[in-house]
């Protein structure tokens, strides 16, 4: 069996016609592969003039196979075949295309999480307000308005927040990789990994535990993606992901301790 170069789906060997999964032209792909093999370096590797070239991913073929098909197929690959996807992902080609994918999926997950949070505040918040408030109906209304106002704000500005988050996460991960000596490729390689890992935001659609599952799977994708994109071991990639989280936890614990000590000191000096 052969693999479709567009979506990595198993097809007949030799490939002929259209891919039954993504609709890609297999005959044109065979011709392109033959041309690439003639220009490849020793051992069939990509030419040194294009060290970041990869077999390609469905998202880069969206003009040909359709935007929605490319979005669905790319998300399926990232979530179910991350190793294959990140090995096929080119690490160069610009930031705009992966950022677009990351913003779309990240916005969808953020909107879902905000929706569940608004429902929670509307229901649970009103119950808390009724426990001893002089005007529980006013407190309940404020809680309801606050929850849904936050949801509307996330829907309107969520794309901006996601884009900023992708850039910050990629910058932090790349800096740690540099410190660990694992950044064998440029910042764009790290940025692409972070952008496509936003596919895990779809797990936010699952109520209650969706966000936790999404965060955990996203961390796993960071490790797999960084290892493949920078051609380093999984241990070094895992260290690049875990170290910033550990520093944040330690910093938060230190701030909480200092705040508690300040409150205790203030309370001790009160008459």
Image: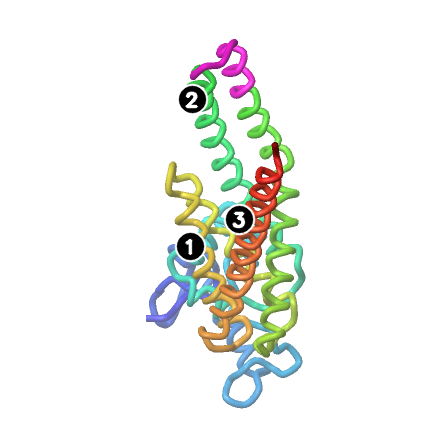
Disc 1 target residue? 216
Side of 88 where 53 appears, left or right: right
Residue drawn at (57%, 68%), measured in percent from left and top? 90
Compared with 240, 72 (above or below) is: above
In which image quadrant can residue 52 be found? bottom right
Kindly identify which numbered label has been placed on residue 123. Answer: 2
CA separation in Å, label 1 and label 2: 28 Å
- Label 3 sits on a secondary structure element that is loop
Q: Earlier in the sequence, mark 1 or mark 3?
A: 3
Q: Earlier in the sequence, mark 3 or mark 2?
A: 3
CA separation in Å, label 3 and label 2: 41 Å
In which image quadrant can residue 131 be found? top left
Give the prevailing secondary structure in the magenta stretch.
Answer: helix
Kindly identify which numbered label has been placed on residue 66. Answer: 3
Q: Residue 205's x, y, as percent?
A: 42, 39
CA separation in Å, label 1 and label 3: 31 Å
- Of labels 1 and 3, the one closer to you: 1
Compared with 10, 217 (above or below) is: above
Q: Residue 268's x, y, as percent?
A: 58, 40
Q: Earlier in the sequence, mark 1 or mark 2?
A: 2
In the image, 201 versus 237, the foreground residue is 237
Compared with 251, 3 (above or below) is: below
Q: Residues within 10 Å of mark 1 (few under 14, many from 20)?
A: few
Q: Residues within 10 Å of mark 2 (few under 14, many from 20)?
A: some
Compared with 223, 38 (above or below) is: below
């Amino acid at each position: 069996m052969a693999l479709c170069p567009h979506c990595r789906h198993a097809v007949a060997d030799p490939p002929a016609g259209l891919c039954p999964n993504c609709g890609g032209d297999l005959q044109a792909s065979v011709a392109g592969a033959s041309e690439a093999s003639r220009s490849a370096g020793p051992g069939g590797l990509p030419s040194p003039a294009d060290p970041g070239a990869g077999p390609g991913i469905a998202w880069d073929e969206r003009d040909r196979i359709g935007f929605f098909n490319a979005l669905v197929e790319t998300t399926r690959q990232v979530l179910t075949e991350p190793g294959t996807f990140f090995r096929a992902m080119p690490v160069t080609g610009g930031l705009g295309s992966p950022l677009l994918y990351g913003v779309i999926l990240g916005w969808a997950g953020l909107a879902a999480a905000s929706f569940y949070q608004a429902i929670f505040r509307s229901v649970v918040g009103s119950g808390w307000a009724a426990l001893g408030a002089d005007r529980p109906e006013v407190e309940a209304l404020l809680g309801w308005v606050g929850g849904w106002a936050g949801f509307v704000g996330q829907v309107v500005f969520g794309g901006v927040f996601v884009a900023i988050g992708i850039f910050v996460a990629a910058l932090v991960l790349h800096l740690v990789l540099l410190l660990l000596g694992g950044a064998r490729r440029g910042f764009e390689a790290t940025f692409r990994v972070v952008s496509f890992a936003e596919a895990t935001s779809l797990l936010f659609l699952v109520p209650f535990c969706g966000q936790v599952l999404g965060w955990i799977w996203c961390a796993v994708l960071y490790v797999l993606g960084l290892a493949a994109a920078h051609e380093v071991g999984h241990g070094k990639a895992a260290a690049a992901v875990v170290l910033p989280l550990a520093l944040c936890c330690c910093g938060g614990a230190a701030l909480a301790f200092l705040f508690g000590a300040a409150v205790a000191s203030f309370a001790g000096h009160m008459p």
